[in-house]
């Protein structure tokens, strides 16, 4: 089978932030899809200078640092290398991360990941860290954004870890009312729309008027990258037509191909 034609003639909407969408878009184009990039959210750096200074001064006292997104990796290390200029300043700090995207972002810094769950959820990351048997009175630094759930912190603290959080970015919805991609979506619709975060789902709902399809537009099937996003879709009244087998871009694309093949 020629995999480069699996999605030929299919129009797929990608809702990730522009700075994150290229990987997914490239995968879809490689399969022959026409991609509409509809960035429902955008991510920017937001770090308290005071909190950053406190963490960097005490960095050597932490046992673990946990990353829950590629954005966290990107913004944290931008500041870390600005201050230390040498990755070896991490010392004996152990690295935990969630999901394949976060692991790929970590790989750019050639740092060993010592804890990564098979399932990309906060609950699974907490379980994996607890399973190391190293958390009792351990200091853990969790790198976060403004919309991160408290689940990971709560579970780690319940396991007697001492947890600090450092917010390094914020996620906000974009205004698509005048966006050409939104206009194309309203007029043409699509075969499928892919959601990769709960924040994108919420932005889609908040901007329903700007994204309302015309009567002639194709109604897309809606796909979720994982259980958390799927739950957000259901709460918002969006039918989940397919879900990635495991949270990740490759699995999401695979689920899309299988669902569209069914007609």
Image: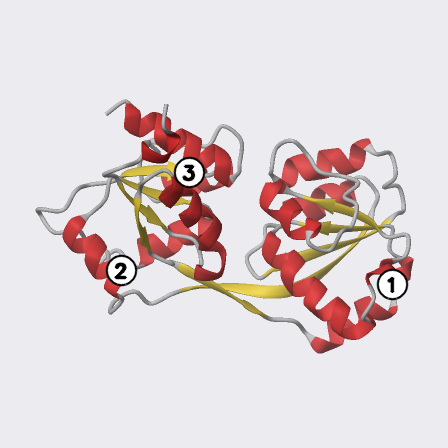
Residue 133 locus on image (x, y percent):
87, 34
**Residue 78: % across, % down:** 69, 68
- Disc assigned to residue 136: none
* Secondary element type, mark 2: helix
Is the image coloured rainbow, by chain, by secondary structure, or in one colour?
secondary structure
Relative placement, left or right, of 35 versus 232 is left
Label 3 packing within 10 angstroms: few (<14), some (14-19), many (20+): many
Residue at 59%, 58% in the rendered image:
71
Write down the residue under mark 3. Answer: 224
Q: Name the front one of labels 2 and 3.
A: 2
Q: Residue at x 43, y 48 (%)?
A: 26
Q: Which residue is mark 2?
A: 181
Q: Secondary structure at mark 3?
A: strand
Disc on res. 89: 1
Rendering quarter of residue 239: top left
Along the viewing direction, whichever of 230 and 187 lies nearer the viewer? 187
| Sequence-first disc among 2 and 3 | 2
Q: Tag 3 or tag 1, which sits nearer the N-term?
A: 1
């Amino acid at each position: 089978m020629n995999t480069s034609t699996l999605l030929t003639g299919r129009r797929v909407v990608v809702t990730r932030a522009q700075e994150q969408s290229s990987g997914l878009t490239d995968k879809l184009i490689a399969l022959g899809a026409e991609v509409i990039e509809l960035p429902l959210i955008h991510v920017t750096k937001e770090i308290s200078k005071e909190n950053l200074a406190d963490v960097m001064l005490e960095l050597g006292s932490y046992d673990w640092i946990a990353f829950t997104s590629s954005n966290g990796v990107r913004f944290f290390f931008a500041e870390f290398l600005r201050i230390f200029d040498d990755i070896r300043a991490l010392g004996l700090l152990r690295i935990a991360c969630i999901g394949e995207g976060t692991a790929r972002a970590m790989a750019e810094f050639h740092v060993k990941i010592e804890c990564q769950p098979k399932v990309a959820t906060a609950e699974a990351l907490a379980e994996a860290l607890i399973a190391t048997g190293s958390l009792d009175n351990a200091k853990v630094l969790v790198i976060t954004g403004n919309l991160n759930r408290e689940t990971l912190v709560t579970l780690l603290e319940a396991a007697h870890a001492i947890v600090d959080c450092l917010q390094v970015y914020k996620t906000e919805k974009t205004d698509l009312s005048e966006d050409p991609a939104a206009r194309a979506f309203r007029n043409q619709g699509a075969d499928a729309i892919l959601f990769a975060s709960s924040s994108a789902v919420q932005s889609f709902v908040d901007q329903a008027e700007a994204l309302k399809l015309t009567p002639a537009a194709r109604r897309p099937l809606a796909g979720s990258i994982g259980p958390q996003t799927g739950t957000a879709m259901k709460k918002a009244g969006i039918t989940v037509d397919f879900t990635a087998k495991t949270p990740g871009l490759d699995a999401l694309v695979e689920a899309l191909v299988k669902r569209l093949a069914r007609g």
